[in-house]
């Protein structure tokens, strides 16, 4: 049976734009108490807009790679808003460059934001989940985390690590009735990551934008890029239902990735 999200505390990282913002809006529509986190101060503007529309929203400008700051924010959420029911670790960064040009700083950054940030936010969120013996953690990997992407070796490595993290944590938290899963979207239209990646492909493959889009769409059995709504719909399912799923990495790729 689907759980009602009314007044449940649902936290979304990377909520200033794109997929994260759309997930926060979905939680608002389900009357959750929504917490929006992002390093980009735009998150405050979006939260203010949603609050004006009558939704229960609080935002934090926070760098998820700063463990101490993350734990402090989650303590505040616990004390002032309530125990977290759902955590969506959506914040992530991408970078595209030939393998030989990956620097130590860029490799480190990919791991710190995509992997360590996910881990720190989860450490912050699980206190209330353990007490309530209920919780949903939804991490963001990528199609690139399953079948790595050329020119994105460091991103692929980090997103592969998110899958392993998800599986390990699913084992560790199962006795507390906390489900830990991750999503592996394909190229998602109208997002920051795709805007960055498509710029990279245009530059690295020396192709016009339309050709880049056609080239990637041609490989997708359902013949379109992932839409933000596809990802939001799956996030909703894993938040309100899917109690018997844990440690999974779900493809949202139109069939591009099948394992
Ligand atoms: N868009 C795609 O094609 C695609 C495909 C597969 C997976 N994903 C994954 O989905 C997630 C969302 O992708 P998107 O395209 O919506 O991303 P986006 O770039 O549009 O938004 C990501 C948000 O994360 C925030 N962020 C980055 N670093 C942060 C930090 N250190 N602390 C707090 N916030 C930080 C950014 O400010 C931004 O608002 C990412 O994890 C991404 O890797 C995206």
Image: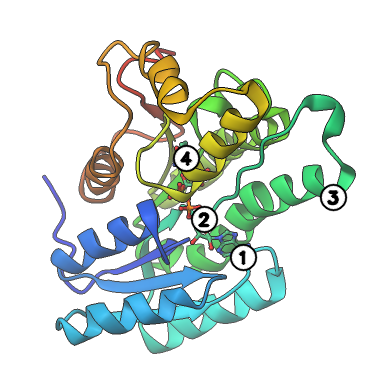
Dot placed on the residue nearer the N-terminal end, 1 or 4: 1
Indicate if the residue with disc 1 has its beta carbon within 8 Å of ligand 1: yes
In the image, 28 versus 203, the foreground residue is: 203
Q: Which residue is drawn at 30% across and 20% down?
A: 254
Can you tell which mark lies on residue 64?
A: 1
Dot placed on the residue nearer the N-terminal end, 3 or 4: 3
Q: How many marks are shown on the rendered structure? A: 4
Identify the secondary structure beneath mark 1: loop
User: How busy is the neighbourhood of tag 4: few (under 14 within 10 Å), some, or many (20 plus)?
Assistant: some
Hey, which quadrant is residue 54 in on the image?
Answer: bottom left
Dot placed on the residue nearer the N-terminal end, 1 or 3: 1
Foreground label between 1 and 4: 4
Q: Position of residue 112 (x, y in %)?
A: 72, 53
In the image, 129 versus 257, the foreground residue is: 257
Identify the secondary structure beneath mark 3: helix
Q: Which residue is drawn at 60% across and 35% down?
A: 159
Q: Residue at x 41, y 47 (%)?
A: 191
Residue occupied by mark 2 = 91
Q: Position of residue 8 (x, y in %)?
A: 25, 69
Location of residue 243 with respect to 252 vertically, above or below: below
């Amino acid at each position: 049976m689907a759980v009602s999200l009314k007044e449940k505390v649902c936290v979304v990282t990377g909520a200033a734009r794109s997929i994260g913002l759309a997930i926060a809006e979905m939680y608002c529509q389900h009357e959750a108490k929504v917490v929006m986190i992002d390093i980009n101060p735009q998150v405050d503007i979006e939260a203010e807009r949603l609050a004006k529309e009558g939704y229960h929203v609080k935002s934090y400008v926070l760098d998820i790679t700063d463990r101490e700051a993350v734990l402090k924010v989650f303590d505040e959420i616990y004390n002032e808003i309530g125990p977290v029911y759902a955590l969506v670790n959506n914040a992530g960064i991408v970078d595209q460059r030939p393998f030989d040009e990956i620097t130590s700083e860029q490799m480190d950054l990919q791991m710190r934001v995509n992997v360590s940030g996910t881990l720190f936010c989860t450490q912050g969120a699980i206190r209330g989940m353990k007490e309530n013996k209920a919780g949903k953690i939804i991490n963001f990997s990528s199609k690139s985390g399953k079948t790595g992407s050329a020119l994105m070796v460091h991103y692929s490595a980090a997103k592969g690590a998110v899958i392993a993290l998800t599986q390990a944590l699913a084992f560790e938290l199962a006795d507390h009735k906390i489900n830990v899963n991750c999503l592996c979207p394909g190229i998602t239209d109208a997002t920051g990551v795709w805007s960055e990646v498509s710029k990279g492909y245009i530059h690295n493959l020396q192709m016009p934008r339309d050709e880049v889009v056609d080239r990637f769409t041609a490989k997708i059995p359902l013949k379109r890029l992932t839409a933000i709504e596809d990802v939001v719909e799956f996030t909703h399912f894993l938040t309100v239902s899917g109690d018997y799923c844990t440690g999974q990495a779900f493809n949202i790729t139109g069939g591009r990735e099948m394992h």
